[in-house]
């Protein structure tokens, strides 16, 4: 074999979940791989996303557990107190541990790690730390970065990168936004003890989710004490004695200690040099790719949150595997099925969902059946809590195939992960019905719902 004209077979810009998986997997095929990262190993998910968010969600759930304990005979000697610094600092320690694991994974795979922000010089060259490096293929896997709309006082807001490491705990907390991050942090800070407000310009948060799930979640979050403000937006934020004054477009004014602008993330492409190569982007600034994860410049690849797929860590991981199969494997992989990807929202209570919403199913199929159960979980018959659980199956009437499954309640993500296998496999409602449930559990409702709620 002739000696390669390039320094590396693959150069990865970004050591997040997708970039690290692609680098390690490609290296395992014998490819020569380098990765450049200018911030932290593990990307958004490990450092300012999924992992710390879930740790904080665990912490917030203790609030409910303490309240529920009395009905089961546990009498706490005194009211529990929360120490923000302990949670924050323990989280920092855990993230550092994970950063180290990612570094060792790359090292053990034989991947060179370069600390610095790489930029693309041309189709086969990158520049990082004063060094110009050639590569047969360049992978852009830099993920997203928080975006905040313009309004007077926007500089006084926090973004989702900074909210984890506040110096002091905000007793009064306001969240702007209506997506995953917004509802999750509203639940988290409410559970930790903040007087929490959520502001959203639309009539209901979590656009794109099943409508019944959205409405049920709204009601449960309100019962837990989150102050929900729909159909309004922030007009101005200004400093006042003792906090921040937030004036809404509705005319209402709120005084809080901190404002989180959870208004979305955009591809972190600034300074990468892709504009010099006229790499094609969509209207929202994401990189356009084909089924081989190639951009309009074929030697430049992209995956994860810089592209138009779901902004989920497991999606980036799976895309990395497919990308390596395409470019360094012996076979052409099957396309990734983006439609039946399960996801969870770690608000309180949790949401788990896979497949089509009821609204999307009605648009696609001539007739559907909807099975749903709205009930008070067994746990709360003694706890005294009024929290309820929602479970829902969407069935194509003609084929009897379950095309969607949704849940709002404790451990929804854990339960829907198993249901997602069945939905991905195309199992029918009859096969769900033939499955013997585990009793007593909430999850058994998914195999005991026999009568359609509606057609």
Image (spheres, rainbow, N blue to C red):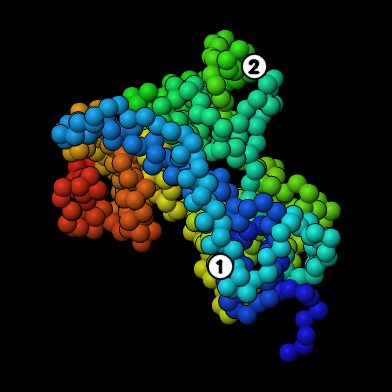
Instruction: Give the numbered dot on residue 308.
Output: none
Q: Which of 38 and 125 is in front in this view?
A: 38
- Is residue 355 depicted above or below 236 in this figure? below
- In which quadrant of the rendered view does residue 187 lie? top left
Instruction: Give the numbered dot on residue 105.
Output: 1
- Cα distance in 3D space between marks 2 and 1: 46 Å
Residue most extreme to the bottom: 1
Q: In this view, does 28 lie to the left or right of 421?
A: right
- In the rendered image, residue 5, in percent from the top left (x then y), is placed at 81, 79
Q: Earlier in the sequence, mark 2 or mark 1?
A: 1
Q: Which of 421 and 425 is in front in this view?
A: 421
Q: In this view, does 267 lie to the left or right of 449?
A: right
- To which residue does mark 2 refer? 239
Residue shown at 65% from the left, 36% from the top: 147
- Is residue 73 depicted above or below 332 in this figure? above
Residue shown at 69% from the left, 27% from the top: 155
Helix, strand or loop at label 1? It is helix
Residue shown at 59% from the left, 63% from the top: 103
- In the rendered image, residue 364, in percent from the top left (x then y), is placed at 43, 46
The N terminus sits in image quarter: bottom right
C-beta proximity under 8 Å, tags 2 and 1: no
The answer to whether one can see residue 100 in this image is: yes
- In the rendered image, residue 201, in percent from the top left (x then y), is placed at 55, 24
- Is residue 260 depicted above or below 438 in this figure? above
Helix, strand or loop at label 2? It is strand
The answer to whether one can see residue 311 in this image is: no
- Is residue 340 depicted above or below 154 in this figure? below
- In which quadrant of the rendered view does residue 284 lie? top right
Residue shown at 65% from the left, 43% from the top: 145
The C terminus sits in image quarter: top left
Q: Nearer the viewer, residue 318 or 169?
A: 169
């Amino acid at each position: 074999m002739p000696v390669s004209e390039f320094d590396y077979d693959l150069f990865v810009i970004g050591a997040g979940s997708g970039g690290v998986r692609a680098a390690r997997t490609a290296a395992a095929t014998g490819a020569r791989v380098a990765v450049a990262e200018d911030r932290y190993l593990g990307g958004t998910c490990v450092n300012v996303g999924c992992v710390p968010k879930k740790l904080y969600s665990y912490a917030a759930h203790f609030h409910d557990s303490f309240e529920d304990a009395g009905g089961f005979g546990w009498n706490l000697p005194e009211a529990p107190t929360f120490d923000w610094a302990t949670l924050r600092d323990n989280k920092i320690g855990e993230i550092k541990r994970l950063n180290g694991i990612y570094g060792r994974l790359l090292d053990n795979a034989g991947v060179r790690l370069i600390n610095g922000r790489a930029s693309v010089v041309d189709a086969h060259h990158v520049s990082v730390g004063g060094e110009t490096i050639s590569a047969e293929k360049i992978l852009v896997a830099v993920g997203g970065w928080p975006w905040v709309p313009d309004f007077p006082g926007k500089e006084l807001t926090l973004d989702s990168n900074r909210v984890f490491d506040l110096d002091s705990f905000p007793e009064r907390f306001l969240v702007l936004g209506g997506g995953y991050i917004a509802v999750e942090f509203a639940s988290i800070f409410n559970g930790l003890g903040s007087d929490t407000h959520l502001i959203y310009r639309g009539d209901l948060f979590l656009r794109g989710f099943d409508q019944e799930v959205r409405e049920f979640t709204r009601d449960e979050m309100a019962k837990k004490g989150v102050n929900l403000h729909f159909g309004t937006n922030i007009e101005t934020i200004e400093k006042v004695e003792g906090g921040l004054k937030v004036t809404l477009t509705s005319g209402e004014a709120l005084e809080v200690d901190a404002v989180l602008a959870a208004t979305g993330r955009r591809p972190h492409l600034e300074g990468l040099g892709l504009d010099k190569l006229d790499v094609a982007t969509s209207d929202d600034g994401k990189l356009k790719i084909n089924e081989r994860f190639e951009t309009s410049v074929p030697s430049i690849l992209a995956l994860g949150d810089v592209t138009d797929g779901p902004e989920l860590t497991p999606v980036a991981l799976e895309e990395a595997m497919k990308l390596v199969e395409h470019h360094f494997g012996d076979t052409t992989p099957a396309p990734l099925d983006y439609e039946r990807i399960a996801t969870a929202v770690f608000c309180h209570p949790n949401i788990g969902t896979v497949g089509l919403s009821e609204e999307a199913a009605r648009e696609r199929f001539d007739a559907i059946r909807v099975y749903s159960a709205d009930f008070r979980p067994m746990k709360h018959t003694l706890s005294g809590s009024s929290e309820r659980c929602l479970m829902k199956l969407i069935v194509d009437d003609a084929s009897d195939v379950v095309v969607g499954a949704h849940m709002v309640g404790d451990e929804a993500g854990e339960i829907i992960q198993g249901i997602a296998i069945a939905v991905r496999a195309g199992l029918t409602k009859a096969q769900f019905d033939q499955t013997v449930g585990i009793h007593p559990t909430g999850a058994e409702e998914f195999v005991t719902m026999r009568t359609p709620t509606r057609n």
